């Protein structure tokens, strides 16, 4: 034991690493532990354990200079870990909102807090403040209004009466699906729904909020100048309004690895701030009196900060945009003080600021992807071989441009590798050729499309923006062509239906080790990455998927297609089933499959897995079935799936996933070889958004 401690102390002494980023890692670890651990008892134990480690290190090694670094690491990291866990727990208790207990249908009254235009989805989305009918509790709900039901006066501040069916925010449909219930908990949403007829305006809206009205006016203006899909993307760049982007373009951008360009985040905010900084610096340098008396980088940094803040507010002030703006402001501060603009310590400070303000952001893909990309960029450019490759030297402009181009491609590849586990974990699919597409797309957006939009808006003040809008349209048409061309290539999309939390944690741990250490020690990070890759490749595709309501069942392994119990008109349901099954194309109804037998009430299919036959019985209707016949059918089945509660006389050989069981466990992923069962409840445990949600 003593020799191991000596080795650890010597390792820390000889490493010569930057300690700051590891504080951010400890904070991330504490927040992640709150999401990963099952409930309050485990959270208390984790907090107590962290505090015990800190106190134990202080007591055991007080005054022991041979353990100084170990003591410092143990105490500080344990305390920061505990702070992260306590922080997100406190945040959940302060802003989390319990969902309504059960679905509600009727006529309600509420005041509009926010209006979100979504013409590509043929709807307008409203966020309303209202009273829960049964308890009188003040709640916030989100409703979709079909375009045919949109009337005048649906602006922020209006009081409306509306008829709708309100539902508790949906938990994950299947293990690994998007967790809307968790997002709604932290957003304060108690219910969602859709209007069934046009609403009635009880009190007209007052003067609309300046930022919201400016954002909508700007988006409408941009779309009027640039027609079609290019105009929808230009409006997203100018105002953050993505509601007009068609689903086909969204899918192409996602499958080509370019979807990050549609979200106002680091790339866009950095481009705006950098442009303002350098323009201000060059213009102010033309005034000799000012240049001799004032530090121009400080003034230019202030101009860039104002531009970044203004752009962030104009584009809606979403958390990813605010996060990017904070990080960019820190970079500006470093530039103004003459410090290195982009370093791992700067990234750590930005991450800590974001997590202190929004600790729940850690669980979302946006935070993970943006900081993973920045860490990968900084780690790559801090590596000595890369520094040597990019070092200034006497050479032609062609050679210099070639080196820059090679570095851009290498950077894209490194970012793609760093983001791949995150994308596969959250979305179960990733664009394989994203690095190549981004080599062209990022400069196209950063140096052509966005500057042209800015120049066009300025020129519109004097009615001369048409040439710039034409160039904007051509640039964005090229961007869309790149997206569709890349997404359409063979093997452009990698499907990975299931990644375990263990594999994902190993990927992240290995990636952080590779990014934060220096020298040969960083190569140790390849060990957890290798183990995670092995776990990922060994994870089998589920044979049977059952939605949380029991209505939708997907079966894999009977061919290239996904077999489904019911055809669904919901794109959300269909996409979830296909993604979690790792299957492309349209699903095939079980009633049309030769190996299945279906009546109006039930479907029966036999699957050969693991050297034996598995008999599945699935209900298709809610019609009353004679109990004796149902019991006999259940006795012949290994697995029974039904959306309704089945009688106790229904006793299959292994699993009865009826309404009662699914209410307690949520959606299921079943691997027949080995009789392995995964449920949504296994990951949600006692977290508040799962406890308060009525899944009936």
Image (cartoon, helix red, strand yellow):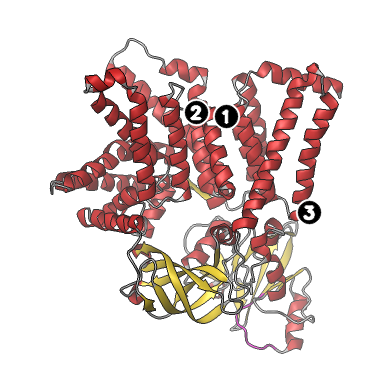
Q: Quadrant of residue 189?
A: bottom right
How far is disc 3 from disc 1 in space, using C-alphas?
34 Å
**Residue 522 pos. (x, y %):** 62, 25
How far is disc 1 from disc 2 in space, using C-alphas?
8 Å
Q: Where, quadrant-wise, is the N terminus in this rendering?
A: top right
**Residue 99 pos. (x, y %):** 60, 68
Of helix, strand and loop, which one carries label 2? Answer: helix
Q: Quadrant of residue 478?
A: top left
How far is disc 3 from disc 2 in space, using C-alphas?
39 Å
**Residue 438 pos. (x, y %):** 39, 38
Residue 58 vs residue 283: left or right?
Answer: right
- Residues marked 3 and 1 touching at CB (< 8 Å): no
Residue 49 vs residue 471: left or right?
Answer: right
Query: Residue placed at 33% from the left, 10% from the top?
Result: 394
The answer, for residue 281, to whether it is visible in the render is yes
* Residue indicated by mark 2: 378
- Residues marked 1 and 2 touching at CB (< 8 Å): yes
Front-lying residue, 231 or 45: 45
| 3 or 2: tag closer to the N-terminus | 3
Badge 3: how crowded within 10 Å, few (<14), some, or many (20+)? Answer: few
* Residue indicated by mark 3: 41
Query: Residue placed at 31% from the left, 34% from the top?
Result: 276
**Residue 19 pos. (x, y %):** 63, 26
Front-lying residue, 251 or 306: 306
| 1 or 2: tag closer to the N-terminus | 2
- Residues marked 3 and 2 touching at CB (< 8 Å): no
For discs 3 and 1, the disc positioned in front in the rendered view: 3
Q: Where, quadrant-wise, is the C terminus in this rendering?
A: bottom right
């Amino acid at each position: 034991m003593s020799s191991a401690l000596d080795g650890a102390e010597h390792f820390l002494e000889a490493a010569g690493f930057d300690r700051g980023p590891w504080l951010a890692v400890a904070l991330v670890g504490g927040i992640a532990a709150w999401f990963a651990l099952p409930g309050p008892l485990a959270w208390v134990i984790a907090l107590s354990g962290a505090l015990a480690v800190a106190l134990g290190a202080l007591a055991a090694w007080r005054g022991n200079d041979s353990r100084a670094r170990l003591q410092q690491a143990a105490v500080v990291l344990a305390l920061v870990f505990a702070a992260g866990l306590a922080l997100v727990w406190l945040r959940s208790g302060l802003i989390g909102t319990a969902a309504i207990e059960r679905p509600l249908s009727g006529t309600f009254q509420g005041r509009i807090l926010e209006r979100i235009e979504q013409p590509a989805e043929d709807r307008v989305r409203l966020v309303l403040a209202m009273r829960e009918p049964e308890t009188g509790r003040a709640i916030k709900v989100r409703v979709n209004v079909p375009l045919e039901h949109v009337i005048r006066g649906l602006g922020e501040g209006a009081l409306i009466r509306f008829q709708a069916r309100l539902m508790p925010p949906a938990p994950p449909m299947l293990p690994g699906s998007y967790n809307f219930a968790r997002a709604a908990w932290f957003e304060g949403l108690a219910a969602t729904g859709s209007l069934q007829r046009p609403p009635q305006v009880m009190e007209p809206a007052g003067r609309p909020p300046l930022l919201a009205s400016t954002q909508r006016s700007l988006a409408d203006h941009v779309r009027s100048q640039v027609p079609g899909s290019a105009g929808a993307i230009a409006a997203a760049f100018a105002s953050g309004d993505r509601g007009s982007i068609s689903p086909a373009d969204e899918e192409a951008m996602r499958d080509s690895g370019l979807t990050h360009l549609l979200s106002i985040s680091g790339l866009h905010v950095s481009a705006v701030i950098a442009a303002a900084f350098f323009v201000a610096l060059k213009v102010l340098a033309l005034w000799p009196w000012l240049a001799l008396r004032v530090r121009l980088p400080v003034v230019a940094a202030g101009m860039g900060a104002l531009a970044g803040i203004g752009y962030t507010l104009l584009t809606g002030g979403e958390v990813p945009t605010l996060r990017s703006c904070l990080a960019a402001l820190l970079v500006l501060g470093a530039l103004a003080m003459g410090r290195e603009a982009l370093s791992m310590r700067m990234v750590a400070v930005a991450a800590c600021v974001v997590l202190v303000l929004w600790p729940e952001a850690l669980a979302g893909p946006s935070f993970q992807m943006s900081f993973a990309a920045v860490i990968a960029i900084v780690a790559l450019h801090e590596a000595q071989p890369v520094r040597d490759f990019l070092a200034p030297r006497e050479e032609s402009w062609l050679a210099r441009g070639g080196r820059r181009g090679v570095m851009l491609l290498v950077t894209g590849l490194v970012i793609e590798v760093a983001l791949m586990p995150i994308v596969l974990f959250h979305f179960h699919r990733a664009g394989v050729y994203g690095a190549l597409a981004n080599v062209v797309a990022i400069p196209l957006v950063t140096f052509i499309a966005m500057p042209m939009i800015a120049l066009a808006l300025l020129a519109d003040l004097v009615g001369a923006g048409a040439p710039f809008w034409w160039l904007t349209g051509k640039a964005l048409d090229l961007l869309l062509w790149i997206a569709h061309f890349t997404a359409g290539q063979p093997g452009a999309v990698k499907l990975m239906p299931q990644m375990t939390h263990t594999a994902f944690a190993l990927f992240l741990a290995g990636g952080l080790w590779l990014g934060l250490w220096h020298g040969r020690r960083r190569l140790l990070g390849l060990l957890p990455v290798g183990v995670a890759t092995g776990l990922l490749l060994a994870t089998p595709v589920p044979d049977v998927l059952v939605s949380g309501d029991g209505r939708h069942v997907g079966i894999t392994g009977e061919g290239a297609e996904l077999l489904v119990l019911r055809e669904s008109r919901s794109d959300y349901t269909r996409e979830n089933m296909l993604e979690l099954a790792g299957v492309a194309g349209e699903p095939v109804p079980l009633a049309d499959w030769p190996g299945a037998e279906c009546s109006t009430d039930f479907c029966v299919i036999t699957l050969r897995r693991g050297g034996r036959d598995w008999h599945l019985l699935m209900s298709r209707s809610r019609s009353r079935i004679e109990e004796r016949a149902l019991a006999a059918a259940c006795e012949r089945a290994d697995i029974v799936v039904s959306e309704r509660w089945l009688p106790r006389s229904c006793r299959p050989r292994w699993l009865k996933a009826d309404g009662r069981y699914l209410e307690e466990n949520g959606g299921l992923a079943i691997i027949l070889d080995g009789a392995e069962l995964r449920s949504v409840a296994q990951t949600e445990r006692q977290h508040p958004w799962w406890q308060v949600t009525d899944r009936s």
